[in-house]
Image (cartoon, helix red, strand yellow):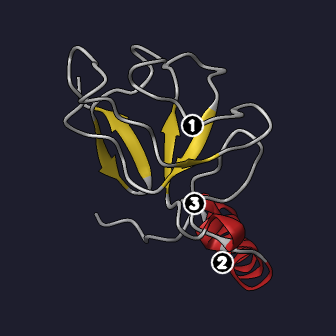
Amino acid sequence: MVMKRQCTDIACCIMFVFFLLMMFAVSGFAVTNGDPNRIVTPFDTDGNECGQGNFAGYRYKYMLSSAANAASVCVAECPSNIPTVATEENQITLDCKVNSVVKTCPNSLKNSGVIKDTTQLLGFCFTSS
């Protein structure tokens, strides 16, 4: 004996389609009225967009420490090949755009341990070690 089959979840199907339509509506509104690039654009401590406007030459975000509330600056290039011991001959000054928290760009001789080897990925300088 074969029972007659019928759809039992019509209400759930209607709600699912409704939520799908609403998801597309909200996504469309966000893309047309917002700036999706702001999701991946790095910002310094003051909220300046690295690589935009006055910061055009400074595309990468560099964190001055690994602490959660650490200051950050926009840099022209991510630092790499930093010598373990800084001397007058091999010192490196970070090419950065200063902000209200970072008044001068760090120097490997004066600010020991602040400048670390980094790898650039998606506009951010990640510590290599």
14 w.r.t. 8: above or below:
below
Tell me which numbered mark, 3 or 1, is placed earlier along the sequence: 3
72 w.r.t. 51: above or below:
above
- Are the two marked residues, 3 and 1, in contact with CB atoms closer than 8 angstroms? no
Residue 16 in view (yes/no): no
Given this view, does label 3 or label 1 mark the residue nearer the observer?
Answer: 1
Q: Distance of mark 2 from mark 1, alpha carbons?
A: 45 Å
In the image, is 16 to the left or to the right of 101? Answer: left
Q: Secondary structure at mark 3?
A: loop
x, y percent for residue 69? 66, 21
- Residue closer to the observer: 34 or 51: 51
x, y percent for residue 78? 36, 47
**Residue drawn 77% across the image and 80% down it:** 29
Tell me which numbered mark, 2 or 1, is placed earlier along the sequence: 2
**Residue drawn 39% across the image and 15% down it:** 113
99 w.r.t. 1: above or below:
above
x, y percent for residue 30? 74, 74
x, y percent for residue 83? 20, 24
Mark 1 nearby-residue class (10 Å; few <14, some 14–19, many ≥20): some
Q: Which residue is mark 1?
A: 105
Q: Secondary structure at mark 2?
A: helix
Q: Which residue is mark 2?
A: 24
